[in-house]
Image: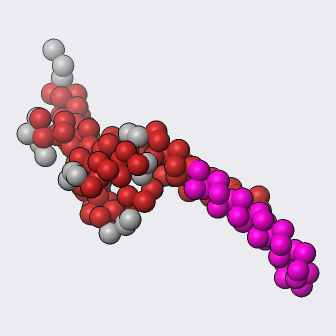
Amino acid sequence: SPSPRRDNTVEADRNEAMTLLRSIVMQSSHTEQDEKDLDIQSLCCESCQSHLSNTSVETSSIRHDNCPSCLDKVKSIADSIKRGIIAENDDNSESNNHEPKLDNQAQCAAINLLVHSHEYAIQMKQSALLARKWLESIGEA
């Protein structure tokens, strides 16, 4: 039979995990509110743009987050920005030798980091949604 001390430790760990999970779910809810102010629809593929127009924010964001075409569109936009940066910096280096040349590699790395962060945020948003559903199913939400 497990000792009372071990039971208390397990219960304390469980309570701490539940508190952390609730915190993640709450943070996700606040993020969803912030996203309502952003024009994310322009980052979606045509299919999801149509879907966004006809559904609630929560339902549509789930679809958008799971859509590879939407993520491809974001990556394509990022690639276009990187090409523009490189072209602009090449033009600036020829026309104005007095200004320091911007570091194309660093700028492109920053854009890559933003895209990677976007992908990670999508994964965390999906995890928080699953956590919310699970907490609701066990009556802990």
Q: Quadrant of residue 5?
A: top left
Is 111 positioned to the left or the right of 16 in the image?
right
The residue positioned 13% from the left and 46% from the top of the image is 141
Q: Nearer the viewer, residue 131 or 66?
A: 66
Q: Position of residue 46 (x, y in %)?
A: 41, 49
Q: Quadrant of residue 132?
A: top left
Q: Nearer the viewer, residue 131 or 91?
A: 91
Residue 68 vs 118, above or below: the answer is: above
Q: Quadrant of the N terminus?
A: top left
- Asked whether residue 27 is drawn in magenta, I would say no
The residue positioned 88% from the left and 82% from the top of the image is 96
Is 12 positioned to the left or the right of 126 in the image?
left
The residue positioned 78% from the left and 65% from the top of the image is 87
Q: Position of residue 54 (x, y in %)?
A: 22, 52
Residue 37 in view here: yes
The residue positioned 53% from the left and 44% from the top of the image is 72
Residue 20 in view here: no
What count of labels does the image hold?
0
Residue 4 vs 58, above or below: the answer is: above
Question: Majority secondary structure of the magenta segment?
Answer: helix
Q: Nearer the viewer, residue 30 or 36?
A: 36
Taking the view exactly as shown, the residue that stands out farthest to the top is 1
- Asked whether residue 93 is drawn in magenta, I would say yes
Residue segment shown in magenta: 76-103
Is 69 positioned to the left or the right of 94 in the image?
left
Q: Position of residue 113 (x, y in %)?
A: 60, 54
Q: Position of residue 9 (x, y in %)?
A: 23, 34
